Amino acid sequence: MQQDGRASLIALYLERRTDLVRFFTVRLRSAAAAEDLVQDIYVRLSSLEPGVEIQNPTAYLYRLGSNLMLDKLRGERRTAHRDGAWLDSQTTRLGAQEVSSEPSAEAAVAARQRLAQLTDALTELSPQTQRVFRMHKFEGMSHPEVAAALGISRSAVEKHMMAALKHLLARLP
């Protein structure tokens, strides 16, 4: 195959395409995977340099397909190994059972309900007490920082916090 080897090789590919699909379907156990592989063969053939010399074009097609298949299988194996290692690092096991690190659905619902109760209880406080509580508990500010931000004494911040905590203890189960 001398004169424009690429064109001749593509013509042979088109002639043998059905055989190639059948051959790789048996090896991959999937007609869809075989179709993809045979399409990859065409892509490789179309990117060959013009004037390439191939001694046995039919064998070349099957060897190219086999190499692409092996590359695909190795890539899938690497991906499965990587994904398995990640899953193992993210999963806790108790014996043979996987234990989820996520809370159960019941626990998540209970937490949402408790948060709703907390939010409702906070709205019953005076606006100033709400601000003091929010700044200290949610924004992480110290008592002196809250006092400075609101222009009140540290003692006033402590009194607002005590009032908020007493109210929340009384309202939450």
Image (tube, rainbow, N blue to C red):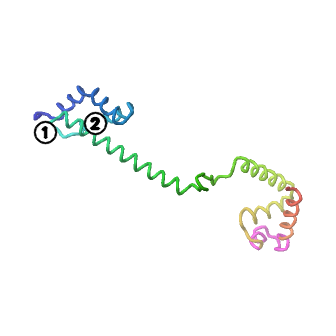
* Residue placed most toward the observer, 169 or 122: 169
Q: Residue at x 52, y 52 (%)?
A: 87
* Residue placed most toward the observer, 74 or 164: 74
- Name the amino acid type tagged 2: Ile
> Is residue 172 magenta-colored?
no
Residue 103: horizontal and vertical position, in percent? 68, 52
From the image, give the main secondary structure of the stretch colored magenta.
helix
Dot 1 or dot 2, earlier in sequence: 2
Residue 78: horizontal and vertical position, in percent? 40, 50
Magenta segment boundaries in residue numbering = 144-157
| 19, above or below 125, in the image | above
Q: Is residue 153 left or right of residue 22?
A: right
Q: Is residue 116 left or right of residue 88?
A: right
**From mark 1 to mark 2, how far is it between C-alphas?**
17 Å
Q: Which mark is residue 53?
A: 1
Q: Which mark is residue 40?
A: none
Q: Which residue is identified by label 2? A: 41
Q: Is residue 137 left or right of residue 33?
A: right
Q: Residue at x 20, y 37 (%)?
A: 60
Element at badge 1? loop
* Classed neighbour count for the residue bearing mark 1: other residues with Cα under 10 Å, few (<14), some (14–19), many (≥20): some
Residue 112: horizontal and vertical position, in percent? 75, 50
- Name the amino acid type tagged 1: Glu
Q: Residue at x 71, y 66 (%)?
A: 140
The quadrant holding residue 52 is top left
